[in-house]
Amino acid sequence: MEPLDVIVGLAGDPALELLNSRATPYPGAEPIELIADGASYLLWLLRTGLIDQEDLAVLQDLFSADQLDAAAADARTLRETLRPLLLAWTGEKPVPFPVDVIDELNALLAQDRRYTQLNPDNDTLALHERRYWERPTQLLTVSAQAWAHLLAEGDPTLIRQCPGCTVIFYDRTKAHRRRWCSMALCGNRAKVRRHRTSAG
């Protein structure tokens, strides 16, 4: 199974997927980078649901590999800017996001150009939102949109980091007691460790 298949979806929130695009699956492991270049960035955007197949085809035709690589580098920079700020925002003594970072997100949001289309869907019509893609820097607008929703509507007390790895997730469980990124991954490793300790 590819790292993209394992990591994408654990966050429970599209904004947090950006932070998890570089993850260390367990202590001592090498970090896994999901947006190493432009091609992997597009694939990551597709898998996280931030773009669709139609967007992917347009972006691959519209921008060169060098332009996409530069956009991936910008995404990695944004990720590393946001990671410590999110951890401070969700800490025991929450620290608000700095105004300059909010301004940076707003500048990205201002680049977004969208329109709505009616698309036939069986015997009905469905609304479908599309984007005008003009510059590779607009690729960051989809993540900025997710971050805007998280910061404005999210509950920082429900954002957690898995104790077994570096994955950050939004706890959407009914009782809000989610502890692990995944019971099949870190939760299972913890059970095995406990079993070995008690048997040992």
Image (cartoon, helix red, strand yellow):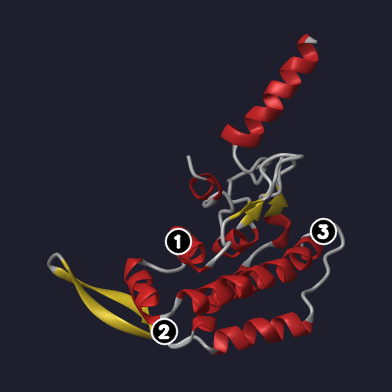
Instruction: Say which amino acid is labelled 1.
Output: Leu
Depth check: give the residue in front, 64 or 187. Answer: 64
The CA span between labels 1 and 2 is 17 Å
Instruction: Say which amino acid is labelled 2.
Output: Trp
Residue displayed at 58% across by 72% down = 149
Q: Is residue 168 visible?
A: no
Q: Does 107 sit left or right of 59 as displayed?
A: right
Q: Looking at the image, is 11 positioned above or below residue 70?
A: above
Crowd band around label 2 with a 10 angstrom C-alpha radius: few (<14), some (14–19), many (20+) = some
x%, y% of residue 34?
Answer: 57, 57
Q: Does 21 sit left or right of 40 as displayed?
A: right
Residue displayed at 71% across by 51% down = 160
Q: Looking at the image, is 67 positioned above or below residue 168?
A: below
Residue displayed at 74% across by 23% down = 193
Crowd band around label 1 with a 10 angstrom C-alpha radius: few (<14), some (14–19), many (20+) = some
Based on the displayed image, in which of its 4 quarters is residue 94 positioned? Answer: bottom right
Q: Looking at the image, is 47 positioned above or below residue 117?
A: above
Name the residue that disc number 3 marks.
91
Q: Looking at the image, is 93 positioned above or below residue 57?
A: above
Name the residue that disc number 1 marks.
43
Residue situated furthest right in the rendering: 93
x%, y% of residue 187?
Answer: 65, 33
